Image (cartoon, rainbow, N blue to C red):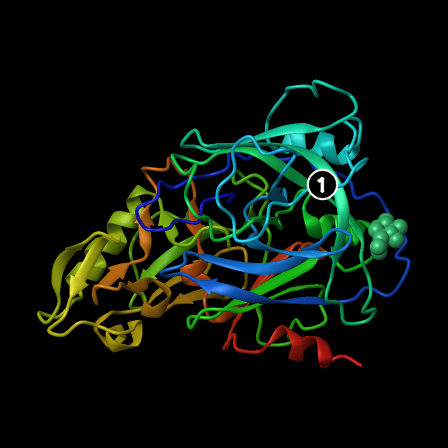
């Protein structure tokens, strides 16, 4: 979800993304055998609140940090077009080359506009203006452009496809004007046709399959293509196309605490790497909070911590989630769409230890950001490979450490 990653104390921002009208894939004959691309991830759930990649863009290519976001489609960079309102970003602002504007009539412009639910026509047919709005009235305004991306690919090392993305020249992100941003922009990997992966598929570069492995120690890897997807042990669930619109959803799940049902109605779930924490709607949120509180030993006391809404302290300050894990019981979600499809949520996938040494719940109440569905964020997807397979319309996950380097993944191919 664009900009939904939540640094503690920063207002939650959610992209208002309406369902895209199903876009028939423009049949492309792959020019070459599809490859796999792999990227090293940086960042963590806490304290960074972001997982991001370095993407090399332009001629000559320059590096930019992009937030990995499977909850929105458009990739965009804060951009010197010139910039009217940009955050302080880690690299010099991206400067678009001449004659790189995508015209309004381009099908990606149409797809972007309908995906954003905006019926505003382009002010000029020569360019594709857009505005992405967020639920707390923050926004990013920009124009679609194209430039070469350098992709670390397994089979052909020098590919530099030209891809369409946003040059964001006016960001109104809360009261963030002068704030230092962790990233230069966003890597939009949603299901829509403007998504970077849809474009790579369209050009015959990779299959429309992506996955990420977010390490609890920080870092991890992201990949495009299906070469490294394990052939066994993966739990697969068909993608659901219901009210959650263009998000990746395994459909509705039922919630268990310590292997027992919490008696909550089946809850619609989406997977969103752009959300740091997990968000539950009112009923499952309340049920989880009471179950956790009811299961705690006397050695833990509820305490107020500025970092997150619900926290506990122990006799001594905790250093990591693994110091306190045994005091908490596991959650799990069972999906009706899959055969015995269960996502285990052990304490390390729902707790954060803050710099104050307290253990805090990383499942937040989705009522405030007005969420009508449940969001599985980074915290809950850590230490498993999560696979979004748009070729077979299925979502999968398999537990395992996320310590492999992107380099070793790429060099494992002949
Ligand atoms: C940039 O992309 C275009 C279109 O795919 C391609 O023709 C061109 O060779 C690429 N430029 C470089 C420097 O690779």
Tell me if residue 231 can be seen. Answer: no
Mark 1 surroundings within 10 Å by alpha-carbon count, few (fewer than 14), some (14 through 19), many (20 or more): some
Q: Is mark 1 within 8 Å of ligand 1?
A: no
Q: Residue at x 21, y 54 (%)?
A: 310
Q: Which sits in the foreground, 63 or 380? A: 63
Q: Residue at x 51, y 44 (%)?
A: 1
Looking at the picture, does residue 317 appear above or below residue 162?
below
User: Where does label 1 land, which residue?
Assistant: 96
Q: Indicate left or right for 218 with 368 as reference.
A: right
Q: Which sits in the foreground, 84 or 255? A: 84
Q: Residue at x 69, y 59 (%)?
A: 209
Count all numbered tags in the image, as a single digit.
1
Q: Which sits in the foreground, 111 or 39? A: 39
**Residue 402 locus on image (x, y percent):** 52, 74
**Residue 391 locus on image (x, y percent):** 72, 56
Looking at the picture, does residue 42 appear above or below residue 132?
below
Q: Indicate left or right for 85 with 345 as reference.
A: right
Quarter holding the C terminus is bottom right
Q: Farthest left residue? A: 298
Looking at the picture, does residue 392 appear above or below residue 18?
below
Q: Quadrant of residue 292?
A: bottom left
**Residue 212 locus on image (x, y percent):** 57, 64
Tell me if residue 38 can be seen. Answer: yes
Q: Callout 1: helix, strand or loop?
A: loop
**Residue 323 locus on image (x, y percent):** 25, 77
């Amino acid at each position: 979800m664009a900009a939904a990653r939540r640094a503690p104390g920063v207002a939650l921002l959610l992209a208002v993304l309406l369902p895209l009208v199903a876009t028939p894939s423009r049949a492309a004959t792959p020019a070459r055998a599809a490859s796999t691309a792999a990227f090293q991830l940086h960042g963590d759930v806490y304290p960074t609140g972001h997982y991001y990649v370095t993407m090399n863009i332009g001629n000559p290519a320059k590096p930019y940090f992009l937030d990995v976001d499977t909850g929105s489609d458009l990739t965009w960079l804060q951009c010197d077009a010139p910039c009217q309102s940009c955050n302080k970003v880690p690299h010099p602002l991206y400067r678009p080359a001449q004659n790189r504007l995508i015209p309004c009539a381009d099908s990606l412009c149409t797809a972007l506009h309908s995906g954003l639910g905006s019926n505003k026509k382009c002010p000029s047919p020569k360019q594709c203006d857009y505005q992405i709005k967020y639920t707390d009235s923050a926004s990013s305004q920009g124009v679609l452009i194209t430039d070469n991306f350098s992709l670390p690919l397994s089979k052909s090392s020098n590919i530099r496809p030209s891809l369409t993305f946003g040059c964001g020249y006016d960001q109104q992100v809360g009261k963030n004007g002068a704030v230092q941003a962790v990233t230069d922009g966003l890597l939009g990997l949603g299901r829509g046709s403007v998504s970077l992966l849809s474009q790579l598929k369209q050009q015959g570069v990779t299959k429309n399959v992506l996955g990420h492995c977010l390490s609890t120690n920080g870092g991890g890897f992201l990949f495009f293509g299906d070469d490294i997807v394990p052939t066994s042990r993966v739990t697969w669930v068909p993608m659901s196309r219901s009210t959650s619109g263009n998000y990746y959803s395994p459909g509705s799940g039922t919630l268990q605490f310590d292997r027992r049902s919490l008696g909550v109605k089946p809850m619609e779930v989406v997977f969103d790497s752009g959300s740091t924490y997990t968000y539950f709607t009112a009923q499952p949120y309340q049920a989880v909070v009471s179950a956790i509180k009811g299961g705690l030993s006397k050695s833990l006391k509820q305490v107020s911590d500025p970092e997150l809404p619900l926290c506990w302290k122990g006799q001594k300050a905790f250093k990591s989630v693994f110091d306190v894990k045994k005091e908490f019981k596991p959650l799990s979600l069972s999906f009706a769409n899959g055969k015995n499809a269960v996502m285990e949520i052990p304490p390390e996938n729902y707790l954060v230890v803050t710099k104050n040494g307290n253990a805090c719940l990383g499942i937040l109440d989705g009522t405030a950001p007005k969420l009508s569905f449940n969001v599985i964020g980074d915290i809950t997807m850590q230490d498993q490979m999560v696979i979004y397979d748009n070729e077979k319309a299925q979502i999968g996950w398999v537990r395992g450490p996320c310590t492999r380097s992107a380099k070793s993944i790429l060099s494992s191919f002949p």
